[in-house]
Image: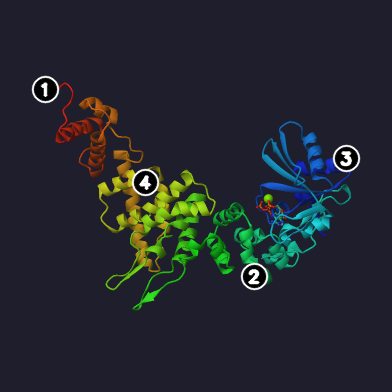
Amino acid sequence: MENLKSFLDKDIFKIVASAAREIGVDAYVIGGYVRDRIMDRETADIDIVAIGSGIELARKVAEKLGDNTRVNYFKNFGTAMLRHHETQMLVVEFVGARKESYSRDSRKPVVEDGTLEDDQNRRDFTINAMAISLQENDYGRLLDPFDGIGDIERKIIRTPLDPDITYSDDPLRMMRAIRFATQLGFTIEEHSFEAIHRNRERIKIVSGERVTDELNKIILADRPSYGFKALEKAGLLQIIFPEFVALKGAETVEGKGHKDNFLHTLQVLDNLSEHTGDLWLRWAAILHDIAKPATKRYDKKIGWTFHSHEFVGARMVPKIFKHMKLPMNEKMRYVQKLVLLHLRPIVLAQEEVTDSAIRRLLFEAGDDIDDLMILCEADITSKNSAKVRRYLKNFILVRRKLVEIEDKDRIRNFQPPVSGELIMETFGIQPCRDVGTIKNAIKDAIIEGIIPNEYEAAFGFMLEKGKELGLRPVGSRQ
Ligand code: ATP
Ligand code: MG
């Protein structure tokens, strides 16, 4: 078998090896780290399996590492997580080798101590079941009982044991299979894929948070559409995210069709992913047309319409976030805002680009304007390349104008040049509707280009507006 000594280039492996020798257990590097080193990928954390107590081994390693080491022990699971700060952040997880047996209604197994072989058998995929020995006599030897190396070469996701049992035991593995396939650009082996399809309903016993964790990793891959298509084909997407599957299909009436919004959205997501690694901007792409099925109408004269799908879509965002166990915080509001505004730049690019329209967009989008532009450009998926070129050209103009107008008028983080306090003081009034009316009128006047975004002009405008409302400045005589 291959010797991967050169892969054990971090000092930590030497330390784990000597700690293991001192307490008399065998230890192996296992799982993701081994896979990623063989594939030459960056990897975040290291998993160590001890043939004996993982907790004891972690304790010994921590003792050797001394300062800068923090260990969390999870006695119930027999695992420990060690963090070490030095030149780099290092996370090492320790676990005792185990054998698992599952009951029908839970993905949490009954666990007993086991051999290395038992431990490799319980791993989800062949490429995740490889181990490298840390014993002195065969330091660096690769233990690869299921030909994980071959599957890496063939680019295949395959379970070590019967896939029906593997997926049924812990249905989260179905999500993981698709996640790894998407991240690595692999294919799920045919029998495995069929087993996922057969066991799809079992995903319901997995907590929403865990499912969403995996979905988010798919979304963060280079080409997320690959994962979404696999999830749909496996029948999982229908269960975990039915609103998205509702986008599928293209209806034709009187010879007029509309585009398949499932495929369109995935293309937008892929396009956008070339420009951003931000999870929430990617979620905005996923949800930008989510209300198209709900707003779809056929009009004899104009064909298919999706009127107000941006408003209805923005209203759907909280419900989807809640049911997907995504955070109900400013991230959600950000996604909601982008869904709501996603048509605005394209409308601008279609028409003459007026300064006031640019100012209004800057005012509404604020600091999210750049993200909105990325979303909108990704949204151009027409097959007509002349049309795409024309839109993109107009977008260059819109972008240039955005910069120009922002430099001049500073609308992005709009601060009213005349405050509510000053309005109240000037007219000697208490907080009331008039204050809001005046403030709004000043803002609108700036956006419409009636006055510049400056104190003097705004103050003068305030006096005029106050007069219209029957207010008089304090100290004036009439
Ligand atoms: P990444 O860290 O990139 O997500 P990974 O392979 O390290 O990939 P982890 O979730 O960190 O994945 O798990 C570490 C290892 O534990 C895996 O490589 C695999 O061997 C095993 N493992 C994790 N989850 C499961 C599971 N649900 N069923 C079986 N084995 C699992
Ligand atoms: Mg890992």
Instruction: Say which of marks 3 and 1 sits in front.
Output: 1
Tag 1 or tag 2, which sits nearer the N-term?
2
Q: At 79% from the left edge and 34% from the top edge, which residue is drawn?
A: 63
Can residue 274 be seen by looking at this rendering? Answer: no
Q: Which residue is mark 1?
A: 477
Q: What's the CA distance linking mark 2 and mark 1?
A: 85 Å
Count residues near mark 4 (Cα–Cα under 10 Å), then give few for <14, some for 14-19, many for 20+. Answer: many
Pointers 1 and 4 in contact (C-beta within 8 Å):
no
Which amino acid does the dot numbered 1 rest on?
Arg
Which amino acid does the dot numbered 4 rest on?
Ala
In the orientation shown, which residue stands out farthest toward the front? 105
Q: Is mark 2 within 8 Å of ligand 1?
A: no
The residue nearer to you, when weighing 338 against 401, is 338
Res. 365 mark: 4
Which amino acid does the dot numbered 2 rest on?
Arg
Image-quarter location of ligand 1: bottom right
Assign a secondary structure to mark 3. Answer: helix
The residue nearer to you, when weighing 367 against 283, is 283
Res. 22 mark: 3
Residue 161, percent from left and from top: 76, 65
Locate residue 405 relative to residue 273 in the image: left or right.
left
Q: At 16% from the left edge and 35% from the top edge, which residue is drawn?
A: 469
Q: At 82% from the left edge and 58% from the top edge, which residue is drawn?
A: 117
The residue nearer to you, when weighing 200 against 407, is 200
Which amino acid does the dot numbered 3 rest on?
Glu
Q: Which residue is mark 2?
A: 198
